């Protein structure tokens, strides 16, 4: 999961003039469709880019729970 998130963020970062930051995270394994995860993350990042404050970056973080993984996209808009 962490690899898919990292690749997506790195691929979209050049399109973020306000900045796109991936918080450091450990590698997280999860069962799921990596193409769908990438598609969902791209949609969330595109939305965050539209509504982020003019001087604020968009931040992405990954948190591991006991049975779930949470990918958080935060804009400060």
Image (cartoon, grey):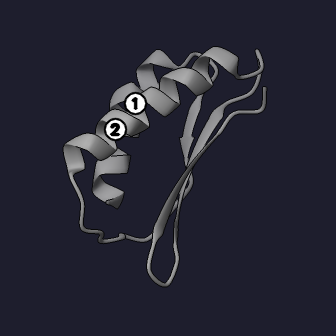
Quadrant where the C terminus is found in the figure: top right
As helix, strand or loop, the secondary structure at mark 1 comes to helix
Q: Position of residue 47 (x, y in %)?
A: 56, 22
Pinpoint residue 25: horizontal percent, then vertical percent: 48, 65
Q: CA distance from mark 1 to mark 2?
A: 7 Å
Determine the secondary structure under disc 2.
helix
Using the rendered image of the protein, determine whether residue 7 is visible from the camera's viewpoint.
no
Crowd around label 2: few <14 · some 14–19 · many ≥20 (10 Å): some
Q: Is residue 1 visible?
A: yes
Q: Nearer the viewer, mark 1 or mark 2?
A: 1
In percent of width and height, residue 15 lies at: 45, 16
- As drawn, 35 above or below 66: above
**Rendered view: 8 above or below 69:** above
Label 1 crowd (10 A; few <14 / some 14-19 / many >=20): some
* Residue in the foreground of this view, choosing between 16 and 4: 4
- Residue at the image position 30 percent from the left and 69 percent from the top: 30
Q: Identify whether 48 is placed above or below 8.
A: above
- Dot placed on the residue nearer the N-terminal end, 1 or 2: 2
Tell me which corner region of the image, top left, top right, bottom left or bottom right, holds residue 17: top right
Q: Which residue is labeled 2 in the image?
A: 8
Which image quarter is the N terminus in?
Answer: bottom left
- What residue did someone put label 1 on? 42
Q: Quadrant of residue 63?
A: bottom right
Please tell me which residue is depicted at 21% across the width and 42% down the height of the picture: 35
Closer to us: 2 or 34: 34
In the figure, is residue 7 to the left or right of 55?
Answer: left
Label drawn at residue 67: none
For the residues bearing labels 1 and 2, Cβ distance under 8 angstroms: yes
At 39% from the left and 26% from the top, the residue drawn is 12
């Amino acid at each position: 999961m962490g690899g898919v998130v990292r690749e997506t963020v790195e691929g979209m970062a050049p399109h973020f003039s306000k900045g796109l930051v991936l918080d450091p995270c450990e590698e997280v394994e999860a069962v799921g469709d990596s193409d769908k995860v990438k598609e969902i993350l791209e949609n969330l990042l595109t939305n965050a880019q539209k509504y982020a404050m003019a001087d604020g970056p968009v931040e992405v973080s990954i948190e591991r729970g006991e049975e779930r993984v949470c990918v958080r996209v935060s804009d400060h808009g």
